[in-house]
Amino acid sequence: MAIEIDQQPPVGLSRVAVSETHGEDSPYFAGWKAYDENPYDESKNPSGVIQMGLAENQVSFDLLEEFLKQHSEASSWGNKISGFRENALFQDYHGLQSFRKAMASFMEQIRGGRAKFDPDRVVLTAGATAANELLTFILADPGDALLVPTPYYPGFDRDLRWRTSVKIVPIHCDSSNNFQVTPQALEAAYNNAEAMNIKVRGVLITNPSNPLGTTIQRSVLEEILDFVTRKNIHLVSDEIYSGSVFSSSEFVSIAEVLEARNNKGSERVHIVYSLSKDLGLPGFRVGTIYS
C-alpha cells in the first residue's frame, strides 16, 4: 500500500546539481538565451537577435550535401541525406527530439504498453554506464552513499564510485526468498550507513537483475518505493534487461507502479535503459535516463 506523507521537503540533489556557479549567468549564455527567445529571420523576424557567439557554420551546407551525394560511402544515410541538416547542427543537450520520441515509444513497446513514457523526460546518454554515473553525480555528493541490493553487477564498483567518490552500501539479500529485497534488509542497510556516519541519497536496483536474471515482484517494488518516500531519498531503477524477459508478465517496471499511484513521487524515481543488451548493440553507446 502506498504511504502518504504530507508537507515533505523536496528530495535533495548533490551540490554540483544545484550549484549556481555553472556559468549560465554569463553574458555569453545571456546572449544565447536572448537568441533562443527571439531568433532573427530575414523575412519572418528581421528585428530578431542574430547569434554571433556560436560556431555553427551553415554557409557550406550545399557543398557538403553535394559531396555526400557523390560519396554515399561517407554518409550513414547513403545517398539519402534528408537528415543531414538536422544532425549537422548543435542539438538539444537531451538528445535529438526525433530519437527521444522513438526511444520513449520503444520503451513502452517492450513493456507491453503497460507504462507510458514522455519523450520530454528522456535524456540520451553514451550508454547505461554513463547514465548511472551521471545520475550518481546528480544525486549524491562525495562520501554519500547509494544502497544497492546484493549480489549486484560488479561494474557498479567502477561506474558508481570511481570518479564520483560516492560509496555503495549493500542491501544484504539471500537465497531463502530468491534474493528479493525485504523491508528489514532496506532498514538494516540504511541504519548501517548511518552508523558509519554516511548520508544515504538513494537506492539503486537492477530489474531484471544482473547477475541473477530474476525480476523484482510488484509488491517488493511497492515496498522499495514506500521506503525511499519515507526516507526522502531517490530510487534509480536500472532496467537495461527489460526487453529480455521470456514471459513479459514476469517483469514489472517501476514506471507501472508509479502510474498506479498517479505518478505520485515520480520526482524521486529515475529509470536507466540502453540498447546494449536487448538489441545486442553495446558498441552503439545508446543509453537513456528517464526522469
Image (cartoon, rainbow, N blue to C red):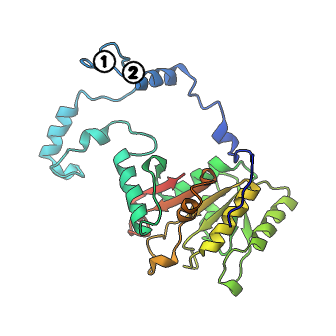
* Residue 45 numbered tag: 1
Q: Residue at x 42, y 39 (%)?
A: 92
Residue ID for mark 2? 38
* Residue 285 numbered tag: none
Whether residue 90 is visible to the viewer of this picture, yes or no, is yes
What's under tag 2, amino acid-wise? Asn
Q: Residue at x 43, y 58 (%)?
A: 285
**Looking at this view, is 115 or 166 the one in front?**
115
| Left or right, residue 70 beside residue 129 | left
Please say if 30 is above or below 287.
above
Mark 2 to mark 1: distance in Å?
A: 8 Å
Q: Residue at x 63, y 49 (%)?
A: 137
**Quadrant in which the N terminus appears:** bottom right
Residues under numbered marks 2 and 1 in contact, where contact means CB atoms less than 8 Å apart: yes
Whether residue 146 is visible to the viewer of this picture, yes or no, is no
10 Å neighbourhood of mark 2: few (<14), some, or many (≥20)?
A: some
List x then y, in percent, for residue 176.
71, 87
**Looking at this view, is 81 or 37 the one in front?**
37
List x then y, in percent, for residue 44.
27, 20
List x then y, in percent, for residue 70.
12, 45
Please say if 50 is above or below 260.
above
10 Å neighbourhood of mark 1: few (<14), some, or many (≥20)?
A: few
| Left or right, residue 170 beside residue 131 | right
